[in-house]
């Protein structure tokens, strides 16, 4: 049976920066997977040592280049919080620790909360803290993809369910 890595906030844990959980329109599928013992829940940011709540953070682009989590992992982009503090090191630690958890549990798929500078897989925010989205991935998604884990946003849970049962 395939084990699936999942963002802890998607299964009701209040670990987001603002101390809330993240609802999912496909929570019935998540509940089914949980009852089947498939889910490995992790919050990369809490695992790295961030408190909850914590200031929101975004990946900053620089030198006219449009950067994302892959660049943060490579040391070419910084992750900063809305007070201006550089929190790159903890984001990289959370990404690497989560990839190790996926490896240890044999996860080939992950369902992660889109938009996050850690967990975003189709979009992130543009680093200006003005609510502007851009295409890109978070640091944890980059680390997972680097070790062969396929990452799905929460909006694609039913597609992954169909694939697993197909
Ligand atoms: S880092 Fe990921 S799991 Fe943790 S709160 Fe943010 S989106 Fe959810």
Image: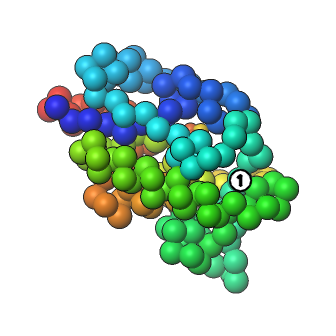
In percent of width and height, residue 130 lies at: 79, 53
Q: Nearer the viewer, residue 148 or 62?
A: 148
Q: Residue at x 21, y 36 (%)?
A: 2
Check the image and tell me how it is coloured: rainbow
- Residue beneath the point at 43% across and 49% down: 98
- Does 125 sit above or below residue 34? below
Residue 19 is situated, as x and y percent measured from the top left of the image, at 70, 30
**155 relative to 13 in the view: left or right:** left
In percent of the image, x 66 and y 46: which residue is there? 50
- Residue extending farthest to the front is 49
Q: Residue at x 62, y 33 (%)?
A: 15
Instruction: Decide: is 32 above or below 156.
Output: above
Q: Nearer the viewer, residue 27 or 9?
A: 9
- Left or right: 36 in relation to 143: left
The residue to which callout 1 is attached is 57
20, above or below 2, in the image: above
Image region (quadrant) for ligand 1: top right
The reply to whether residue 58 is in sight is: yes
Quadrant of res 90: bottom right
């Amino acid at each position: 049976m395939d084990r699936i890595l999942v963002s802890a906030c998607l299964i009701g844990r209040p670990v987001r920066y603002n101390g809330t959980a993240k609802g999912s329109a496909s929570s019935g599928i998540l509940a089914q997977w949980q009852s089947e013992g498939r889910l490995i829940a992790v919050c990369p940011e809490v695992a790295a040592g961030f408190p909850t709540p914590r200031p929101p953070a975004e990946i900053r682009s620089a030198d006219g280049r449009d950067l994302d989590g892959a660049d943060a992992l490579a040391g070419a982009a910084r992750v900063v919080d809305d007070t201006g503090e550089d929190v790159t090191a903890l984001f990289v630690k959370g990404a690497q620790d989560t990839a190790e958890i996926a490896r240890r549990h044999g996860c080939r798929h992950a369902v992660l909360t889109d938009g996050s500078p850690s967990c975003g897989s189709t979009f992130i925010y543009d680093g200006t803290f003005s609510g502007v989205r851009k295409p890109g991935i978070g640091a944890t998604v980059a680390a997972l993809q680097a070790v062969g884990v396929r990452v799905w946003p929460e909006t694609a849970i039913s597609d992954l369910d169909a694939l697993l049962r197909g």
